[in-house]
Amino acid sequence: MELEKLQNELLRKIGRNVLNFQQLEALLKASIVRSQVQGDPRDLKSILAQRERSFSTQTMGNLVGEHVRLIYGEPKGTSTPSVPEDIPWISYSFKFKTEESFVVQRSSALAKIVEERNKLIHQLLPGFDYSSAEACETMIKFLDEQNAFLASEYAYVKQVCEAMIDLGEEAILELRKQLLGKRE
């Protein structure tokens, strides 16, 4: 393959991987923000907006740690903050209860994603010799392997988010059923 075609293919694959890292980061943020919510139901939109702001600037490493802690960590006590009795309160938490070995495996896999992202962005790209066909071919192979691992981790985090959505939808449907049943 001629050098210009190799360079274009390389740039396309760099872009693909960077975009896929960003999409995974967005899923991690969504899972963190929505995994634990509590407060006055009238304030839930602002509570979620505040949580989104607080995680919007976190590094990917921090997001991975928070995701593992919130989704797979040991449940904290079920106590709620002290609120006046005349204020409605809602509390929602989504967690997987699983073996410690699974938590370690998930944590390691996500830590590897952070390592791979940092390797690409901070180590491999700066100073890369785009004028070498051999270097381009080697990097293309690396990017394809990296993307395969990234895709499998993305799929798993996406399943977690879909489970959160499914459970939330079921809860809403049940609540509507209960509320409508009481009106009749």
Image (spheres, helix red, strand yellow):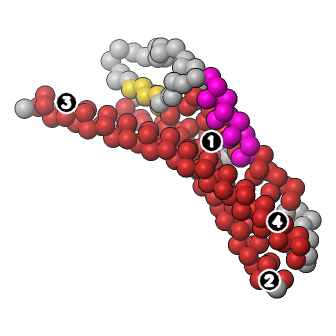
Circles 1 and 3: CB distance less than 8 Å?
Answer: no
- Does residue 125 lie above or below 129 as drawn? above
Viewer-nearest residue: 78 or 167? 167
Q: Which mark is residue 1?
A: 2
**What amino acid type is highlighted by mark number 4?**
Met
Q: Foreground mark, 3 or 2?
A: 2
106 horizontally vs 82: left or right: right
Residue in view at x 49 percent, y 44 percent: 159
Is residue 66 visible from the viewing direction of this image?
Answer: no
Identify the residue position indicated by label 1 in the image: 55
**What amino acid type is highlighted by mark number 3?**
Gln
Q: Foreground mark, 1 or 3?
A: 3
Q: Residues within 10 Å of mark 1 (few under 14, many from 20)?
A: some
| N-term-proximal mark, 3 vs 4 | 4
Element class at badge 4 = helix
In x, y percent, where is residue 16? 67, 65
Q: Foreground mark, 2 or 4?
A: 2
Circles 1 and 4: CB distance less than 8 Å?
Answer: no
Element class at badge 3 = helix
Residue in view at x 73 percent, y 58 percent: 145
Q: Foreground mark, 1 or 4?
A: 4
The verdict on residue 101 being magenta is yes
Is residue 99 visible from the viewing direction of this image?
Answer: yes
85 horizontally vs 110: left or right: left
**What amino acid type is highlighted by mark number 2?**
Met
| N-term-proximal mark, 3 vs 2 | 2
Q: Which residues are magenta?
A: 100-114
131 horizontally vs 164: left or right: right
Q: Foreground mark, 1 or 2?
A: 2
**What amino acid type is highlighted by mark number 1?**
Phe
Q: Quadrant of the N terminus?
A: bottom right
